[in-house]
Image (cartoon, coloured by chain):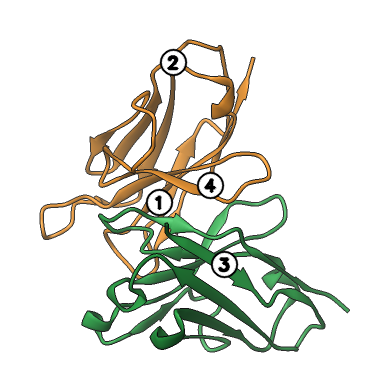
Chain colours: A green, B orange
Amino acid sequence: EVELVESGGGLVQPGGSLRLSCVVSGFTLSDYHMDWVRQAPGKGLEWVGRSRNRADSYTTDYAASVQGRFTLSRDDSKNSLYLQMNSLKSEDTAMYYCGRDLSGSNQAYLGQGTLVTVSS
Amino acid sequence: EVVLTQSPLSLPVTLGQPASISCKSSQSLAHGNGNTYLSWFQQRPGQSPRRLLYKVSKRDSGVPDRFSGSGSGTDFTLTISRAEAEDVGFYYCMQGSHWPPLTFGGGTKVEIK
């Protein structure tokens, strides 16, 4: 059974940092592109970034709104994906979801999300 | 960046009746490889999003066949053939033909009349 479990969210001050984790099970992480999507309170879905699979050399891509502040990484041996978030702003407040290849032809999955609140 | 515009913003539906949501793209979503990477996601109240359809009309595993997708180029439609109470929630289209970035539509709220 495929499962994605996010963690690491919490309350952080503007300008601060946070590292989110996504632990996956039920599939081989290196075979898949992995996406992060966020949802601000009462708002729609926004793609944050993608960690491409091993075949694509683990290239990372980011939304313009987080480029230069957020960094994606992964440790396939630990079945884990990470989102390092620096220079956080109030507009980064959102539920963050980890997802398996949301635009691909294989079954897509999303986790239950982890809430990030940026506030003083 | 591809902009997706959904309509309507809110859709009251009658149980057992059909319902449709439109998604219009700012540019053609036909990919050079012949595929069109337009997906639909459902988000029920208090739950994570779930993908229903990919490549316009292909259903993800476990998705009821009352959900169908159609369209090409810049115009796409999600249709619920017979609405059920469990279909209440938000629906989002998403394109993956021209990325980065992946982009989502603004969402449509489906509620029961």
Q: Residues within 10 Å of mark 2 (few under 14, many from 20)?
A: some
Q: Look at label 1 and name its amino acid.
A: Met
What is the CA distance from the residue labelled 4 to the residue labelled 2?
Answer: 24 Å
The answer to whether the residues at label 4 and label 3 have Cβ atoms under 8 Å apart is no
Circle on res. B82: 2
10 Å neighbourhood of mark 3: few (<14), some, or many (≥20)? some
A80 is higher (above) or lower (below) than B107 = below
Callout 1 crowding tier (Cα within 10 Å): few <14, some 14–19, many ≥20: many
Disc 3: which residue: A5
Residue linked to disc 4: B106
The amino acid marked with disc number 3 is Val
Q: Quadrant of residue B23?
A: top left
Which sits earlier in the primary sequence, circle 1 or circle 2?
A: 2
Q: Chain of mark 2?
A: B
Tell me which label, 4 or 1, sits earlier in the chain: 1
Amino acid type, label 2: Arg
Same chain under badges 3 and 1? The reply is no
Circles 3 and 1, Cβ within 8 Å, touching? The answer is no
Do tags 1 and 2 sit on the same chain?
yes
Residue type at numbered disc 4: Gly
In the picture, the disc for residue B94 is 1
Q: Is residue A68 left or right of residue B29?
A: right
Q: Nearer the viewer, residue A28 or A53?
A: A28
